[in-house]
Image: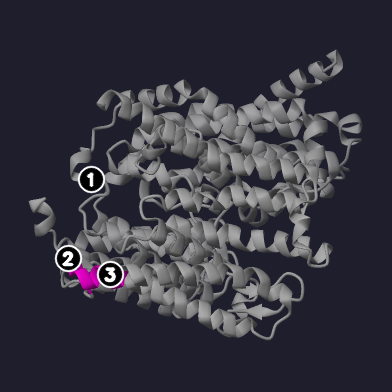
C-alpha cells in the first residue's frame, strides 16, 4: 500500500494527445461527409460515433484522476529533456531532413548523409571514421542492390545519374 | 487420386527437384524482398518480368513460386527481430515474435517461425492439391455478407489487444478504422477526410502506414537502449541449442500449426482476401481458444505460430482460384497469370487435362520450395538473430532510411514518405503513452475492406440492414463469430473458478 503512495502521478497530458487528435480528426471527417450520399456516411458515422464515445469515456476518466490528484496534465511520458541527451530530437530532425532532401539529392547521397549525421548524433561524435565508412558502405550497397541490380524505383539524383552514365559508357 | 495422377505428381516432383539451382538463390532473394517494407514478391516479379518471360515456362513458374513463398516467410524475419513486418501479411507476427527477441530468444523465435511457415505452407499445398475442386467453390459461396463476418473475426483482435486497458485499446482500434476510411467511398467515389490531398483519394496506402507505425516509431524508441535485447535477456553466443529448442517447441504444437494454416488456406482461396486478414484471424482464433490467453502478447510461441502458419497457408490458397477458375486470389497470383498467359497457358479445369505438368507443377514447385527453405534457412536463424545485438545507434538510422524509402517504392509519391513520417510520429506517441500500434494498424488494414463489403451488401439490398443475416453460410459464420467471442469468456471464467477452489 505504501508503494502506491510513492507512485509518481500519472502523466495524463501525454495520454490525452491521441484522444484529442482522434476527436479533432473525427469532427473534420464528419464535416467532409456531411452533404455526401449515404454510402459515404453510414459506416464512418458508426465508427466515428463509437470513437467519440470512447474518447468521451476516457476524458471523464482523466477528469476523475485529476480531481483525485492521481494524475497531472504533464507530458513527461511523451517528452523529456532526456530526448535531447539520447539524440532523439536530433534523429527526428535528420529524419525530416532525409525526407525533404531525398527527392533532390537522390537515394544514395541522402542516405549516406542521413546515416552519417544521425549515427554521429546518437554516438555523440565518437567513432567518426567508422561511422563514415559504415554509412558509405550501406548507401553504396543500397544503390548496388536496389538501383543498379534491380532497377528499383528509388528517388534518383546526381550520384545515380552519374553512375548510370559511367556504367553505360563502360 | 488415380494412378495416372499419382505418376504425374511423382514425375513432376522429381522434375521440380532438378530446378534446385533456381529455387535456392530465389529463396534468398525472396527473403530479402519480403523483409523490406515496400518490396514484395509481386513487385519483384514485375521488376524481373523480362527475366521471367525469357525463361522457359517451367523455370519461370518455379522462380515465381519460390519467390512468392520465400517473400512470405521473409516478411516475418524483421517482424520478429526488430518489430518491423516486411508486409501487411506479417503484421500480427511481432505481437509475440518481438517480445521473444527482446527476451534474448530471437533465434528460438525465428526457428519457430520457420518451422510453422514451412509446415503450414507444405501441408496446405498438399491439402490444396487434394481438395482443389471443393476449395475452388469456396470463392463462389463467399459474398459480401460472408466477408463482413470474416473481417469481423480479424477486427475482434482489437478487443483482445485492448484487454489491458480496454478504453485506450478501443480508441487506438477505432482511430485506425477512421484512418482506414480516408479516401473515396466505394459506391459513389465521394472523397472523405482527405485533407485535400489527391494522393489520399485511393485511401491510405498500407506500406507507409506499416513503415511509420512499426519501423519509424520503433527506431525512435529503441535508441533508449544499447541493444534491442533487454538487459535481463542476456544475448547469447551463436548455438544450435536454441534453434533445436525452437524446432522442438514448434513441432510439439503441430496441431496448432495445422488448424491455423487451414484458416490461411481457406481465406487464401477467397479472391480479394489476403495474408493480412488470415494472420489476424488466425491470431485471434488461436488466442480465443488457448488455455493461456493471458500469455499472448508477451512472447508466447503459439502467438507466433498462428500468424506465420496462416500467412503461408494463404500462398497455396491463392493458387486454387487462379488455376481452377482463372481468377487470381491476390496481386502475385495476378502477375503469375500474366506470365503464364504469355507462355500460352489457358486456365480453368481444362488446365489439368491439357497441361497437367503445369497445373500440378505449380503446387509441386511450392512444396519443393518449402522443403528447400526449411533446409537452407533454418540453419541461418542462429546468425540472423544477431541483428538484436547490433548497437541501436547504428541500427535505428538504418531502419529509418531503408524503410522510409520502402514507403516510396509502391506508388513513387514523395507524399508517401511524408505520410510514413507522420505515421511514425503517431506511432511514437502511441507507444510512449500506452496505445497499441497494432490495434491502429488492424483498423487501417481491415477497416476499408469491412466498409467495402458492408456498402456492397447495403447497396444490393437497397439499404436493408437485415441483408447481413440473409444467407445460410453467413448465418453459420455469425454463429461461429459469436461463439468465438463468448466461448473464450466462458472458458476464462471456468479457469478462474478452478483456480479459486484450492484457495478456498
Residue A144: x, y in percent?
Answer: 47, 58
- The answer to whether the residues at label 3 and label 1 have Cβ atoms under 8 Å apart is no
Looking at the image, residue B435 lies above or below residue B471: below
Q: Chain of mark 2?
A: A
| Residue named by callout 1 | B230
Residue farthest to the front, as pictured: B504
Q: Secondary structure at mark 3?
A: helix
Pointers 3 and 1 within a single chain: no
Give the percent coordinates (x, y) of residue B436.
40, 57
Say if residue A112 shows up in the picture.
no
> Is there any visible trace of residue B105 in the rendered image?
yes
**Left or right side of B48 for B297:** left
In three-dimensional space, the C-alpha distance between marks 3 and 2, rounded to whole angstroms, equals 13 Å
- Image quadrant where residue B181 sits: bottom right
Q: Residue at x 38, y 39 (%)?
A: B294
In which chain is the residue bearing label 3? A
- Residue B167 versus residue B185: which sits nearer the camera? B167
Q: Which mark is residue A9?
A: 2
Image check: B112 left or right of A75? right
Between A5 and B240, the one nearer to me in the picture = A5
Q: Residue A64 got which mark?
A: 3
Mark 1 or 2: the one toward you? 2
Count of residue discs: 3
Quarter that holds the C terminus of chain B: top left
Q: Which residues are magenta?
A: A62-72
Percent of width and height locating residue B423: 44, 69
Amino acid at each position: 500500500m505504501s508503494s502506491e503512495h510513492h507512485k509518481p502521478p500519472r502523466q495524463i497530458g501525454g495520454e490525452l494527445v491521441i484522444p484529442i487528435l482522434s476527436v479533432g480528426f473525427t469532427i473534420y471527417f464528419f464535416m467532409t461527409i456531411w452533404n455526401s450520399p449515404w454510402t459515404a456516411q453510414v459506416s464512418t458515422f458508426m465508427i466515428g460515433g463509437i470513437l467519440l464515445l470512447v474518447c468521451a469515456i476516457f476524458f471523464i476518466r482523466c477528469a476523475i484522476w485529476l480531481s483525485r490528484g492521481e494524475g497531472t496534465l504533464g507530458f513527461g511520458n511523451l517528452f523529456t529533456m532526456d530526448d535531447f541527451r539520447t539524440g532523439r530530437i536530433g534523429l527526428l530532425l535528420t529524419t525530416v531532413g532525409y525526407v525533404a532532401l531525398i527527392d533532390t539529392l537522390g537515394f544514395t547521397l541522402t542516405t549516406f548523409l542521413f546515416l552519417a549525421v544521425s549515427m554521429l548524433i546518437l554516438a555523440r561524435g565518437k567513432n567518426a571514421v567508422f561511422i563514415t565508412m559504415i554509412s558509405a558502405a550501406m548507401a553504396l550497397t543500397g544503390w548496388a542492390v536496389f538501383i543498379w541490380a534491380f532497377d528499383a524505383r528509388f528517388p534518383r539524383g546526381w550520384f545515380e545519374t552519374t553512375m548510370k552514365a559511367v556504367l553505360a559508357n563502360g | 487420386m488415380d494412378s495416372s495422377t499419382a505418376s504425374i505428381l511423382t514425375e513432376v516432383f522429381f522434375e521440380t527437384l532438378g530446378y534446385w539451382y533456381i529455387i535456392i538463390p530465389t529463396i534468398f532473394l525472396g527473403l530479402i524482398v519480403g523483409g523490406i517494407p515496400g518490396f514484395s514478391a509481386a513487385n519483384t516479379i514485375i521488376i524481373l518480368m523480362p527475366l521471367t518471360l525469357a525463361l522457359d515456362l517451367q523455370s519461370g513458374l518455379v522462380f515465381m513460386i519460390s519467390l512468392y513463398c520465400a517473400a512470405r516467410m521473409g516478411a516475418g524475419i524483421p517482424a520478429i527481430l526488430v518489430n518491423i513486418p516486411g508486409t501487411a501479411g506479417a503484421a500480427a507476427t511481432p505481437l509475440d515474435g518481438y517480445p521473444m527477441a527482446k527476451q534474448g530468444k530471437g533465434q528460438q523465435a525465428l526457428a519457430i517461425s520457420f518451422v510453422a511457415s514451412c509446415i503450414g505452407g507444405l501441408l496446405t499445398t498438399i491439402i490444396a492439391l487434394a481438395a482443389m475442386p471443393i476449395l475452388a467453390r469456396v470463392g463462389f459461396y463467399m459474398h459480401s455478407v460472408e466477408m463482413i463476418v470474416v473481417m469481423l473475426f480479424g477486427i475482434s483482435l482489437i478487443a483482445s489487444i485492448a484487454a489491458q486497458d480496454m478504453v485506450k485499446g478501443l480508441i487506438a482500434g477505432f482511430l485506425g478504422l477512421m484512418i482506414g476510411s480516408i479516401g473515396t467511398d466505394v459506391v459513389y467515389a465521394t472523397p472523405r477526410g482527405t485533407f485535400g490531398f489527391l494522393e489520399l483519394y485511393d485511401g491510405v496506402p498500407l506500406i507507409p502506414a506499416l513503415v511509420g507505425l512499426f519501423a519509424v516509431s520503433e527506431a525512435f524508441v529503441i535508441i533508449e537502449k544499447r541493444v534491442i535485447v533487454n538487459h535481463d535477456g542476456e544475448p547469447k553466443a551463436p548455438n544450435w541449442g536454441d534453434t533445436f529448442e525452437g524446432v522442438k517447441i514448434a513441432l510439439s504444437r503441430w496441431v496448432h500449426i495445422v488448424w491455423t494454416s487451414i484458416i490461411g488456406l481457406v481465406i487464401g482461396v477467397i479472391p480479394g482476401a489476403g495474408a493480412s486478414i488470415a494472420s489476424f484471424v488466425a491470431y485471434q482464433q488461436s488466442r480465443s481458444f488457448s488455455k493461456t490467453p493471458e500469455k499472448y502478447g508477451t512472447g508466447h510461441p503459439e502467438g507466433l505460430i498462428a500468424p506465420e502458419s496462416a500467412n503461408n497457408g494463404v500462398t497455396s490458397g491463392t493458387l486454387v482460384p487462379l488455376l481452377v477458375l482463372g481468377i487470381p486470389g491476390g496481386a502475385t497470383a495476378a502477375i503469375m497469370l500474366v506470365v503464364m498467359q504469355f507462355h500460352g497457358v489457358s486456365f480453368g479445369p481444362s488446365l489439368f487435362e491439357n497441361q497437367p505438368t503445369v497445373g500440378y507443377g505449380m503446387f509441386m514447385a511450392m512444396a519443393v520450395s518449402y522443403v528447400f527453405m526449411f533446409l537452407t534457412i533454418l540453419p541461418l536463424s542462429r546468425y540472423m538473430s544477431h541483428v538484436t545485438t547490433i548497437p541501436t545507434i547504428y541500427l535505428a538510422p538504418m531502419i529509418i532510411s531503408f524503410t522510409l524509402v520502402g514507403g516510396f517504392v509502391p506508388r513513387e509519391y514523395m507524399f508517401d514518405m511524408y505520410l510514413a513520417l507522420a505515421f511514425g510520429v503517431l506511432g511514437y506517441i502511441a507507444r510512449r503513452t500506452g496505445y497499441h500500434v497494432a490495434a491502429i494498424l488492424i483498423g487501417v488494414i481491415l477497416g476499408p475492406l469491412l466498409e467495402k463489403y458492408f456498402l456492397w451488401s447495403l447497396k444490393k439490398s437497397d439499404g436493408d440492414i437485415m441483408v447481413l443475416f440473409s444467407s445460410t453460410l453467413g448465418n453459420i459464420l455469425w454463429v461461429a463469430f459469436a461463439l468465438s467471442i463468448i466461448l473464450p469468456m466462458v472458458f476464462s471464467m471456468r479457469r478462474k473458478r478452478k483456480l479459486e477452489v484450492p484457495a478456498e
